[in-house]
C-alpha cells in the first residue's frame, strides 16, 4: 500500500516544483543518465571526398526557419524554466541565441498555465535579448486540458517564433508528479494548429517516434517533428533516480533501452514523405553527429545537455561549444564536398555500415 501511494500522482506545490527542476538539472549532468550509444552513430558513415572542388571558406552552414535567417542548423533544445536556478541558465542561452542567431527552445512553460507571474522570467529575458529567437514549450497533456487562449499566452509571453509541444509518455509515467493523461492528443493538436498564431513543432524528449505515429501526425497540420530519439539524456533514468518509489526506480531500469535512437528513426523514415519537416535531436554531441542527421534529411539538429553544462560554466564556454560544433559541421561538409546543408542532404553522401 505504501509503495502504491508513493506512485500516486498529484498536484505539486511551488516548493516541490523548484525541487523537481533542480533535481532534473543535477541528474541531467550525471553520466549515469546518459544513454551510451556511440556505436549507433558509427553505423552510418559520411563518405570522404578527396577532391571536394570547393574552398573551406566557401562552406556555408547557414539555415532558415520560415522567414528568419539563422547562422546554423544547430539549435538549443528545450530545457529548463520557471525556477530560481533557471534564470541564469536561460539568460545565458538567450544571449547565445541572440549573438549567434540560432533557435532556442525554452523549457516547459507548464507553470505559467497556473501562475501568470511565471511569464515574467521570459518577459525580462526577451527585453534584455530582443533578438533572441525563442520557441515556446508545453506538454501534450497540458494542450489536451487547457483552453487555446492559455496556450497562446505562452507563445505571447516570449514572443515565440514557434511552439514546441512535447510528448513524453515514458517520462510522465515514471515521474512521481507526472501527468500521464494522453487521451485525445491528436485531436487537441489538430485544434491547436488551426488556432495558434505560430507554427507548431511536435517533439519527444529522447525516445523517438515510430513511422506509424509520424504517418498519423501527417494529418494534423503541424509544421515540424523533432524526433528527439534515444542516445543522449535519458528521461526514464532521471525520473527513476529521483523517485523514492522502489517500483518506479526499478521500472526505469527495466525500460532503460526503450525507444528508438535518433539514427534508427531517420533510417526507418528514409524513403517516407511527410507534410511536415523533420528535425533531429537526442544524443547529438558533436558537429559530425549533426552532419549525419542533416545528410539524412533533417533540416535542423538540436542539442540539449551539452549546452546546459556549458551554460552553467560560463558564457565563454557556451561560445566555445558553439564554435566547436560549427567547425566540426563545416569540416564534415567540406570533406564530403558539400557547399551547404541542402547540398549535403541532396548528394546522398552517407552509407549504412550495418
Ligand atoms: C535539464 C533538461 C531539461 C529538459 N526539459 C525539457 C522540457 O521542459 N521540455 C522538453 O520538451 N524537453 C526537455 N528536455 C529534453 C530535451 O529537449 C531533449 O529532447 C533531450 O534532452 C535529448 O537531447 P540531448 O540528448 O541532447 O540532451 C530537457 C532536457 C534537459 C537536459
Image: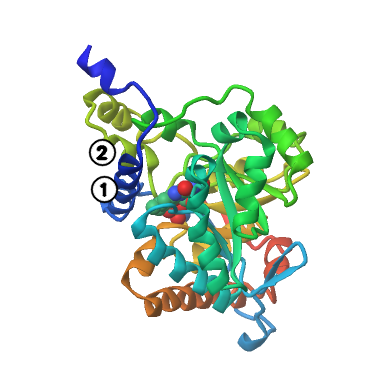
Q: Which mark is residue 32?
A: 1
Q: Earlier in the sequence, mark 1 or mark 2?
A: 1
Q: Is mark 1 within 8 Å of ligand 1?
A: no
Locate residue 340, reporting x and y percent. Answer: 69, 73
Locate residue 213, reporting x and y percent. Answer: 64, 31
Locate residue 327, reporting x and y percent. Answer: 51, 78
195 on left or right of 80? right
Q: Residue at x 42, y 78 (%)?
A: 320
Neighbour tally class for label 2: few under 14, some 14-19, many 20 plus, Cα within 10 Å? many
In the structure shown, which secondary structural element does the residue marked by tag 1 occupy? helix
Residue 331: which quarter of the image? bottom right
Residue 144 in the image: above or below residue 67? above
Residue 171 seen from this side:
yes
Of discs 1 and 2, which sits in the foreground? 2
269 on left or right of 106? right
State the residue position of label 2: 241
Amino acid at each position: 500500500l505504501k509503495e502504491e501511494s508513493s506512485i500516486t500522482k498529484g498536484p505539486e506545490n511551488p516548493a516541490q516544483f523548484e525541487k523537481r527542476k533542480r533535481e532534473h538539472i543535477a541528474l541531467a549532468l550525471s553520466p549515469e543518465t546518459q544513454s551510451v550509444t556511440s556505436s549507433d552513430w558509427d553505423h552510418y558513415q559520411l563518405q570522404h571526398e578527396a577532391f571536394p572542388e570547393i574552398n573551406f571558406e566557401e562552406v556555408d552552414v547557414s539555415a532558415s526557419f520560415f522567414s528568419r535567417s539563422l547562422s546554423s542548423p544547430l539549435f538549443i533544445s528545450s530545457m529548463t524554466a520557471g525556477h530560481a536556478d533557471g534564470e541564469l541558465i536561460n539568460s545565458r542561452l538567450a544571449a547565445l541565441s541572440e549573438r549567434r542567431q540560432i533557435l532556442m527552445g525554452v523549457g516547459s512553460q507548464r507553470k505559467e498555465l497556473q501562475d501568470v507571474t511565471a511569464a515574467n522570467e521570459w518577459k525580462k529575458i526577451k527585453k534584455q535579448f530582443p533578438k533572441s529567437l525563442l520557441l515556446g514549450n508545453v506538454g501534450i497533456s497540458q494542450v489536451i486540458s487547457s483552453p487555446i487562449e492559455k496556450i497562446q499566452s505562452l507563445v505571447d509571453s516570449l514572443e515565440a517564433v514557434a511552439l514546441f509541444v512535447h510528448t513524453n509518455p515514458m517520462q510522465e509515467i515514471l515521474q512521481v508528479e507526472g501527468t500521464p493523461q494522453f487521451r485525445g492528443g491528436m485531436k487537441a493538436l489538430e485544434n491547436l494548429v488551426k488556432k495558434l498564431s505560430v507554427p507548431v513543432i511536435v517533439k519527444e524528449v529522447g525516445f523517438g517516434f515510430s513511422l506509424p505515429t509520424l504517418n498519423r501526425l501527417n494529418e494534423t497540420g503541424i509544421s515540424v517533428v523533432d524526433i528527439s530519439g534515444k542516445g543522449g539524456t535519458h528521461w526514464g533514468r532521471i525520473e527513476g533516480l529521483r523517485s523514492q518509489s522502489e517500483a518506479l526506480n526499478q521500472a526505469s531500469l527495466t525500460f532503460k533501452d526503450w525507444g528508438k535512437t535518433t539514427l534508427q528513426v531517420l533510417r526507418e523514415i528514409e524513403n517516407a514523405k511527410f507534410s511536415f519537416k523533420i528535425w533531429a535531436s537526442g544524443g547529438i554531441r558533436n558537429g559530425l553527429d549533426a552532419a549525419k542527421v542533416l545528410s539524412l534529411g533533417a533540416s535542423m539538429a538540436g542539442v540539449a545537455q551539452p549546452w546546459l553544462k556549458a551554460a552553467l560554466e560560463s558564457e565563454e564556454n557556451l561560445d566555445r561549444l558553439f564554435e566547436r560544433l560549427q567547425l566540426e559541421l563545416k569540416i564534415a561538409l567540406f570533406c564530403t564536398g558539400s557547399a551547404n546543408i541542402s547540398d549535403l542532404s541532396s548528394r546522398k553522401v552517407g552509407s549504412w555500415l550495418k
